[in-house]
Each structure stands twice: as structure tokens, then as C-alpha cells.
Image: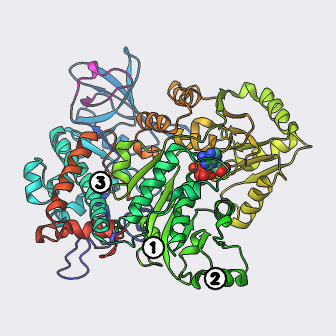
Amino acid sequence: MREEEKNFMPDLETDIRAIRGIGEQRAKSLARLGILTLGDLLHYFPARYEDRTAVRPIAEVLPEESACIRAMVATEPRLSHVRRGMDLVKLRIVDESGSADVTYFNQAYVKNQLIRGEEYVFYGKMGGSLLRKSLTNPVYEPADRAGVTTGRILPIYRLTRGISNRLLIQCMETGLDECGDMLPELLPEELLQRYRLCRVGYAYRNVHFPADHTALGLARRRLIFEELFTLSCALGLLRGRRERSAGQPIPLPETEEFYASLPFSPTGAQRRAVDEALGDMASGQLMSRLLQGDVGSGKTLVAAALVWTAWKAGFQSAFMAPTEILAAQHFATLSGFLSPFGIRVGLLKGSMTAKEKREIKAAAEAGYIHVLVGTHALLTADVAFQRLGLVITDEQHRFGVEQRSALTEKGDRPHVLVMSATPIPRTLALMIYGDLDVSVLDELPPGRQRVDTVLVSESYRERLNGFLRDQVREGRQVFVVCPKVEEGEDGDLKLKSAAEHAQALQKTFPDLRVGCVHGRMKAKEKDAAMAAFVSGETDILVSTTVVEVGVDVPNASVMVVENAERFGLSQLHQLRGRVGRGVHKSWCVLVSDTKEENARERLRVLVRTADGFAVAEEDLKLRGPGDFFGSRQHGLPEMHVADLFGSMDMVKEAQSAAAELLARDPELSGPELQPLRQHILRLYALKENTWN
Ligand code: ADP
Ligand code: MG
């Protein structure tokens, strides 16, 4: 620690630059890891550990194994310049069991540090052969002073440029010494006792610097419990607040009147979901319901039925979608369902002229528009309603909890429906959407085309191109999805990029119209390219995963995914849902040259099953939940230690502990619960009175 100020007492909020050796440059690098304060530092857990505790005889360590070896330097270290910029130090070490060659590359100083006849502890990966073993660049410590980089369980942190593992370890030691005792104990004493959990100080010390395997196990168990428990408490708190808050009762309508106006009859699942939601809305309590349904299951119809019900009772609705294209599509669909009743549907987009926006907003505020569809533009402060009774958000995992509440604040506690096309296995849904009631559309409308899925390799390219040409000749359109935007983006030349692949396809099909959409384009360009495809002006649309969410192009019959092994199963399933939405036979072609049996097996799951929930279960099993959700798609704080799937028992324990606590103290108002309550409010950016 720096001691510029006298009596300087660092705490968890103290800037990381207070640590000796951390200046502007390193602070910037640490910021990339999310470390700004000493508190952040202590929360930065190791990604893995290297067990350097066991010291083993040379003879027992097989090539490819990593191990600590206590050995004597047997030869004078020899320095040689192989060529410019390449120095080698070579020596030989022996213990009672055998000997090994040691080589250091470009570490000339080693020659003077390692002394013939002295004993050291080396740690490294054994190379060479059984007959002549060798170590390259092993770390070492004098045997009588070992225990810093050898002889212990070493934490290995995720690093960034300019920050070494050694530096992080040093910082962590300082951080723990200075404020390891200030970490607030979030778990009430009673829980520590009942679930036999170690205390917070012990947990942090041992998760970073485990005394031994038992200590590490105890530390991890406690931290996982804490993470799952706080999440459960937060969701339970929200749910409780909502259940205690009254909502506008909206009387149950005669739904047959609505259904009779449709060009088709609703599926059983749609009827069930509508009934569940209308039951909530009539109950006198607030509705907060998640509508989960695979792509194409007909969620929009359910939404329309609720909007219709609200309208009958004199309430306006707001409908928020994540992109302009989707907003425009929902606008068209809802208009189709609702205008026969005289319900006025409005659309608000960022790309409208100021005048258009003004007019739409005035119409919403005056109550002239009955349902306003839009993007994030709906969240802006000058959007107001006369009597907002229902808020619907589509693809909610792209919006955070705060955004949801920004919209609901525009009404007097309106009912809320969130729609998601990401099938989530039940076990996880409880953890992630624990604050919502759930309806599931588990039935596709009749006559839906099953999308045939095939897995092909690069050698199939010519036939694939022929197939695409045939489809376009028949009047169909084609989606092609690539894993990245531009060539060389991540140095991996084997990956197809959208921009380059579009050019290549245009060359292959000079007479066809090839469009391209990716995340680096401006919103306007993106929308224009999407619109050209929707209207049939382009035949083939090459894109990154921006088309993942519910764009409806009934004329598209083929979805090609390049480097398919790079995508999550659930993501691929979503992409596949982009086709087969019309009357045409449709295909999903997964192109992959991967030789990895695991990856191929994953892709074969898609070939085998069309059921989104089955795909999600498989995905979860094969990859674990971290990858499953991608980067924070669920809008919840990142999990640091808990692997929801791997810790299913703990999930249940934490859930019941949270439920029990909240049953006794629904607002966590007891004095011993204040650290927990503050932590939750901060973590979830909740206001004191957020109810949803
Ligand atoms: P998603 O759940 O993916 O949002 P949509 O609401 O976009 O699905 O519906 C997909 C398509 O299915 C739309 O064209 C819609 O009109 C149609 N559809 C919805 N419900 C039915 C039904 N019961 N019978 C036939 N077609 C339906
Ligand atoms: Mg949809």
C-alpha cells in the first residue's frame, strides 16, 4: 500500500491504484477485467488452480505430466546464443530417482541464479522421453525458501494484456491483508450454522489462496451458496412485492368473440396461455407473466388477445420489441388481428422524422392510439399514455429488469407480459425467471413445415451452391449466417465472415442479388438491407446472428449456417426457426468441417430433434449454463462461481433457504439482513420500491 496520507485506511471502495505498483497504465488494464476498487479485486476469483503441492521424484513423472520436482543442479548452467534474439540456458538436474535436462529460452539471467550443487523446487510440464526427460522454462525456487510459486495450490486468474498472474497474486495478497476482514457477511449466522458454511473472510482467503483442497472445497461451497441464495432472495423479493401490490382488475371478456374474428383457430396452447394471463389480469393483483414459446408457436396472437381485452376495458397497451424490423412486423401483425375491432395500432421508431414521432406521441398521450408498438424509443421520457394498462415486451432476455420497469412506470402499475423464444429448461427457468409466472406454448400451429436439418462438410460446397441456385430459381430466398463480421477479426482465418462470404457468393451467383447485414453496420443500413430481403428484392441474405430474433420472411426456405460448430445449439435452433414459416418445404444446412467428435455430436442433436426444449436440455447438458446463455443475455448479474447445472442440489438448498427467509421477513428488514438487502438492491439495480 502507498502511505502518502498518514493514517490512510483502505477499504473495499478504495481505488485499486492505492496498491503499490499499480499506476495509471496497470489500472487501465485491470479495469478491463472489471477491477476498479479493492472490493472488485477480491471478487475477482481464480479461473482455475494448479496443484503444485505434491513434490514427486523425477522417475515417476511421465512425459506430459506437470509436477513439482525437488532436485539439485548437477551441471554448471551453460549459456549459448543460438542466433540473434535467441539465448538458451541448459543444465541438468538430479534427485534420488533420476535426472532431467532443463532448458530456458531467452532467460539468460537464469545462468547466474541457478547454482550448481544447490537444491531447488522446480515446477513445469515434463517433456522428452521416458529415457531422457526434459523440462522447458520450469519455474523454480530455492528448496529452503519454496512455497510462493511451488509447493502450494496456485490460483490461475483470467488475464489481460499488461497484467500477469504473478502481479494479480501480489495485488490479491495486499488486498486480502488490507481489507479481507472488511468483507460484509451477507449470510445470517443462522444459515451459516444450518448449512455448515464457512465465514466470508475464510471463504475469500481460501478461494484465492487455498490452504489445501479441503479449505478450497469449503470456500467454494460457501461462495456458490451465497451467489445462488442472493439471486433467489432477489427474485423472491420482487415476486413478493408484486404479489402484495394490487393491479387494475380487468374483467374477463368473452374470448370467443375475439377468436371468431381470426382467419384460423387458436391452438390449445394459445388458449391456455390466454386464459392464464387473463386470469391474472382479472385477479386484482398485478400480472407479471413470462410467455415462453418456440419460434413460430404464435406468441403474437396471445399478445393480441390481451391487448384486445385491455382495450375492451378502456386501457391502452404498449408493446416493445428489440429491433425496428421486429417492431414493424409486430405492428403489421397486431394491426391485422386488431383493426377489425376498431382498435388503433401505432408504431414508434427511432428512424421516423421528428414530426412523425411528435404526432404519434401526441396520439398516444391523448388516448387516441390504443396500442403503441415500438423499440427502445418507447422508453424515452416524452412518451406518455393516457391510461396504460398493459405492457408487453418481446424477446425479453435482451432487455434488463430496469428497462422493463422504465416502461411500466409510464402507467399506473400496468400488467406485464414478457415473451421469450428461448426455451429454457424448467430447472433454470425457476432460477432466472423466479420473479415471473410462466406460460408455455408447447404446441405449434397445424400445417407448420418441419424444417429438415442436414449437417455437411466443406466438400459439399458445390452441391450446396447448386441447391441454393435451384431454390432461388423456384422463387425462394436463402439466409446464410456466418460466425463473424470481417476477415481476420480474431486471427482465425478458417472462420467465414459475413462481409467476405457475401462477396464470394455474389461472385458465384453473378445473376442473383446477394445482400449483407451485420452488427457493425449503422442501424439505418441494417434496416434497409433487412427490408430489401423481407420485400424479396434480395435473393440471398448473408449475415451475422443479427437475424436471430423473430424476423418473419415466409418466402425464405433455406437457412445455411457456416462454421456451425461455433454456435450454441439453442442459437442454431433459433436460426433454424427463421425458415419454415410459410407454405414452402424448408431446410437448415449446417456447414462444419470440425473433426471434434463432441462438436459433431452437438450438431447432430439438431438433425435429430425439432423440439426447442429438447435442444435446450441437450445444450445445457453439453455446455453448462454459462455458455448456454451467452454473455449475460438473461439480464441478470453474471455468475462468478456457481454453475447452475453442476450445482443443482445447491440450487434447491439455496432456493428453499431464501423462500423460508422471505416467508418470515418479506422485505429483508431485520437488522442482521441489512448487508444482504443492500447487496441485492445494488446488484440488481433495484429501487427501494420496485415491484417488477
Ligand atoms: P412467434 O411465437 O415466433 O412470435 P408468431 O406469433 O410470429 O410466432 O406466429 C407465427 C406465424 O403463425 C404467424 O404468421 C401467425 O399468423 C401464425 N399463427 C399463429 N397462430 C396460429 C394458429 N393458431 N394457426 C395458424 N397459424 C397461426
Ligand atoms: Mg415473434
Residue 100 position by quadrant: top left
Q: Residue at x 46, y 68 (%)?
A: 404
**Local secondary structure at mark 3:** helix
> Quick one: label 2 or label 3, which is nearer the N terminus?
3
Q: Is residue 106 visible?
A: yes
The percent coordinates of residue 483 (x first, y second) are 63, 45
Q: Nearer the viewer, residue 345 or 673?
A: 345
Q: Is residue 343 above or below residue 429?
A: below
How far is the residue under mark 2 from the one under mark 3?
Answer: 60 Å
Left-right relation of 468 to 45: right
- Residue hosting label 1: 408
Between residues 438 and 157, which one lies in front from this camera angle?
438
Callout 2: SS? helix
Specify whether residue 399 is painted magenta. Answer: no
Q: Which residues are magenta?
A: 56-73
289 vs 620, nearest the viewer: 289
Question: Residue drawn at (57%, 58%), measured in percent from left and top?
Answer: 257
Q: Which mark is residue 363?
A: 2
Image quadrant for the N terminus?
Answer: bottom left
- Ranked by sequence position, the earlier of labels 2 and 1 is 2
Q: Is residue 262 left or right of residue 675?
A: right
Q: Secondary structure at mark 1?
A: helix
- The spot of residue 663 in percent (x, y) is 17, 60
Q: Residues within 10 Å of mark 2 (few under 14, many from 20)?
A: some
Quarter of the image for the C terminus: give it. Answer: bottom left
Q: Is residue 61 magenta?
A: yes
Q: CA distance from mark 3 to mark 1?
A: 46 Å
